[in-house]
Amino acid sequence: MMAGASTTGASCPAGHSAGVAACGPVGPIASTGGAFLKDSYGRDLILHGVDAVYKHAPYELYVDPGKPWNFTAADAKAIASLGFDMVRLGILWKGIEPGTLAPNSPQICTPGLPGHANQWNASIAKSYISKVKETVDLLGKYGIFSLVDMHQDVYNEMFAGEGAPNWAVCTDGLPATNTGNWSANYAEPAVGVAYNHFWNNDVIGNLQGNYDRAWRMVAKSFAGNRYVLGYDLFNEPFSTEVFSVGGAAEFDARLECFYTGSAHPGSLSGSPVPLTCPPTDPAEGAIPTIRSVDPTHPIFYEPDVSSDFGNADWIGPMPYKHLVLNFHDYCLAASFYTGFRSSSPVCPTQEQQAFSSQATARTNAADKQNPGGPAWFMSEFGAEPANTDLADMVAFANEHLVGWAYWQWKYYNDPTGGPSEGLASTGANGAPIVHQGRAAMLSEPYAQATAGTPLAMSYDPSTDIFSYSYQPNHRITQPTVVFVPTYRHYPRGYCALAEGARVTSAPGSTHLTLVAGRASSLVTLRIVPAPCGALPATLS
């Protein structure tokens, strides 16, 4: 079947809320097993979006005119206009629980059984989370779901990073040597000690217990919020063990214990043997802590940071529903500074290896709670200029049918990033100015919500031809939705050529909708530039 096209007729303006079936996913979002997240109608989702993380005080983004952390309706509208339906929205432990004690305070860092840190202030936490909620609701009004991300890099500001409050830094008295390169600071002894005290939870301040309590309050505040995509537990977990041979597997075992707790150990990928967790770990880890107040929002868990560069992911089955394997993909051959990527010829191989290792880990994490393995999602990549490497990454994600979030929306003077990472900047009037080169690569046609199972998806930026196929599920009555960036790639309109389904959206719509024929077992779609009547015979 064929549908014509025009240069007008966008059916879903950038101001639609996240609740219109013909305009994309409808919450609540679920992860019920298998590679894809699902919306409330059971449609398989491929989400595209951006990260938005503010790493300086006040450690969050919200409407505050004139401030560098100001995040407004203009930002949300610009993000939606690119066809993005999710934002990985940063929160920081230090923002939730800043406390009053200094690093290496004996009230916290004395070795021993975990007790009480006495740094919690419920009113501070409540005020912080209320501003996060304002931003979540603002994004939701523009059709955008929020993945709430507890962010950190290099643990704390004293290491030129961010994340943990000062009182949670225990270095055994080692000085906080700062090399001047935040990423190189990962190799500093004090950083390794601070992380290990957190993962071992072996000081009286009960570092993991306090972190989990912060998550509990966040999850309780967002339980039932249909604009929340889920919770990202810990950004890029690190230990010095990842530098040693076999160390990634050893660290991933401790990391998995942090996720589950000692009372509910899972097993490493490919191993049927339950883990033995450090005796000082909380009995109920981060996942069951969240589940105690929010039983349904998907929980996104990350492997250790070395998996960003293609290393094996050893995180295995964990006995909880609604999990999502959440990974990052960067080229280690490029400069280790985020924001300075290269076109090294080894990058494509390494980046594809990251997809392959995560595909294996996802399958190996299958259990009765997550049949077929958990869904998967790439929540960071990019942080780079508009170049061949960025184009490759978007193509790889299409090939693997994986949703993604580009790092990041704006630079925000990122202490652990680089000035070339922002997809947008802030103009003189406070409105976002989108970087057109990056936007041309990232804002592309894609299947947002599929009434069935996605099979293959590709987009050729040299011809603007998009191809998609899926196996329809006739029990789903809502349409398949494909975002089409008419303004950016189809200014003269487009022609949608569908087999096995009919196009039900208006000509030229930014959100193309398909309804499969009752007898169809396969739907194929091809979008080509120019109205159908103007197509050459070779394309029609």
Image (spheres, rainbow, N blue to C red):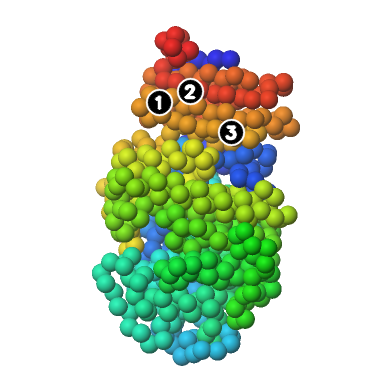
Q: Nearer the viewer, mark 2 or mark 3?
A: 3
Disc 1: which residue: 464
Disc 2: which residue: 527
Identify the residue at horizontal 35%, vertical 72% (top origin): 187
Cα separation, mark 1 vs mark 2, equals 8 Å
Q: Quadrant of the N terminus?
A: top right
Using the image, determine if residue 406 lies above or below residue 160. above
Residue 292 percent coordinates (x, y):
69, 66
* Mark 1 or mark 2, earlier in chain: 1
Residue 465 percent coordinates (x, y):
43, 24
Q: Nearer the viewer, residue 57 or 301?
A: 301
Q: Which mark is residue 247?
A: none
Cα separation, mark 2 vs mark 3, equals 16 Å
Using the image, determine if residue 341 lies above or below residue 46. below
Q: Nearer the viewer, residue 510 or 457?
A: 457
Q: Nearer the viewer, residue 264 or 5?
A: 264
Left or right: residue 91 compared with residue 19: left
Identify the residue at horizontal 61%, vertical 63% (top origin): 268
Mark 2 residue crowding within 10 angstroms, few (<14) / some (14–19) / many (20+):
many
Disc 3: which residue: 455
Residue 334 percent coordinates (x, y):
30, 53
* Mark 2 or mark 3, earlier in chain: 3
SS for dot 2: strand
Q: Amino acid type of disc 1? A: Asp
SS for dot 1: loop
Identify the residue at horizontal 50%, vertical 48% (top origin): 356
Residue 168 percent coordinates (x, y):
46, 79
Q: Nearer the viewer, residue 392 or 413?
A: 392
- Res 361 visible: yes
